Amino acid sequence: MSFQTGGSFPASLVPSPIQSATNSNYLNFTDGTNDWSQQYLPELYEQEVERYGNRTLSGFLQMVGAEIPMTSDQVIWSEQNRLHVSYNTAYYGSGTTILVDLSTTGPSGGASTSCAIKNNQTIAYADSATGLIVEKALVISVSAPAANIVTVTVLPYPAATINASFSGLTTAGDMNVFVYGAEWEKGSDDLALQSISPEFQQYSNSPIIIRDKFSIDGSDAAQIGWVEVATEDGTSGYLWYLKAESETRLRFNDYLEMAMVEGELAGHTAVPTGWTANLKGTEGLFSAIQTRGNVYNGFAGAAGPGAGAMADFDAILKQLDKQGAIEENMLFLSRETALDFDDMIGAMAGGGYASTAAASYGLFDNEEEMALNFGFSGFRRGSYDFYKTDWKYLNDASTRGLTENIDGVLIPAGTSTVYDQMLGVNIRRPFLHVRYRASETEDRRYKNWITGSVGGAATSGIDAMNVHFLSERCLCTQAANNFVLFQSV
């Protein structure tokens, strides 16, 4: 008696009546007569390999910002100007006159309508190149603006005429001038004295609509995959469409933050194809700092890592002194710049410099362990505390890791505390606010809905499940003059 060959069995495979591997019933994939299509029960790993680790990038704004609803197409805020009167657009006129260019002063950088320097005030003026040539004088008269130029006539204290060293400073910006006091004659009245009306800086931003969608037809939704999947948000299972929907959601969450960081305002009035309105855009974090903040190019570039980078860092501290001098600041850095900071701090600490001692961690309730749990390490330099951490967004090979022109950002902590009704505690007011459109009937902070006739939805006759994502938001970068953007040269 013999077994019939053929049918569902390959010609080279003869079944055996017992469980025994023989020359006639063993599949040999090296003799050239068989291939993998004949292995009906493949041996597969059940779990998907997470070769890129945690791929999500969001969380930065949750750590340093606040989310606040808004009801309009535009958000407007005002910021204080400096308290004291100074101009960096001055230059030498003739005789005993100093000219002040008002074309680049005033709110939002526009031309000012009057000069804040008044009669009988005492001023100090210096060359802007070095700041080493300094003279002081009494203001005799101030002219009305003519083509945005004001003539300030002075009587210097050292001599009756302005020092000859200023005679060559004849271009706007060659001289800096500031008011430090006043001097009046005995028995004088103040009938001619004019008051100074404070001006404020006004800024605005507009929200953009961010959308995404995941779609799968009914047939594919019913297909069970071989591989068990698990994603960063905890989604797991054997259905591929669950993984795809989860990754669409994760990607959309990242877009919400990346759009607030990278957003740009449109500098033209072109209308995109298919649109009825002009391209608008929104001002993101990087754009706001480049426009209104401080940009430092090539940190530790010429000096290299180690103690030499301290000169670069001290230059940044001097710039912070000229701004708000906010004590606590957070550094979000690329890997290379973070290592530069590590080398710099290590070199100085090894030299016994007390000024690089650990920060007080006041931002984290003065608990170092809490700061470390958030991935921060702290140090102190001068009168400032800094909390440093890597920013994954700058290192990721599919985002900013491709460009490498941004090395990091310094973000100040809030300067005052407010009562948070949701948390029930006092919290620091941040300088970064994410404003999203919301009203009593519509909340566009994070909208998510399902349409179609698959996956439980029954909204249309389409044999598919469509998962929709939408948000309308913008970022308000307040007091950008206290931020520092680290750029590569």
Image (cartoon, rainbow, N blue to C red):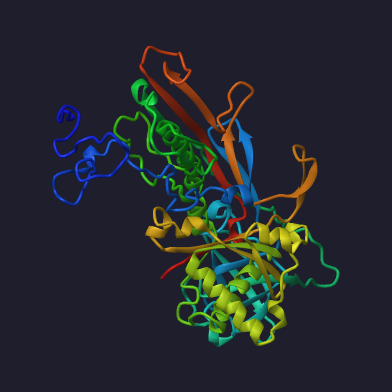
In the figure, 209 relative to 181: above or below? Answer: above
Nearer to me, 415 or 378: 378
Tell me which residue sits at (60%, 69%) in the image.
152
Total numbered labels placed on residues in the image: 0
Q: Quadrant of residue 219?
A: top left
Percent coordinates x, y for residue 480 in the rendering: 58, 56
Percent coordinates x, y for residue 430 in the rendering: 67, 51
Tell me which residue sits at (75%, 71%) in the image.
181
In the figure, 35 relative to 332: above or below? Answer: above
Percent coordinates x, y for residue 372 in the rendering: 67, 62
Q: Is residue 35 visible?
A: yes
Nearer to me, 53 or 33: 33
Relative side of 417 to 158, left or right: right
Q: Is residue 127 visible?
A: no
Q: Quadrant of residue 363?
A: bottom right
Quadrant location, the C terminus: bottom left
Furthest-front residue in this view: 1
Percent coordinates x, y for residue 286 in the rendering: 49, 55
Tell me which residue sits at (30%, 42%) in the image.
20
Relative side of 456 to 478, left or right: left
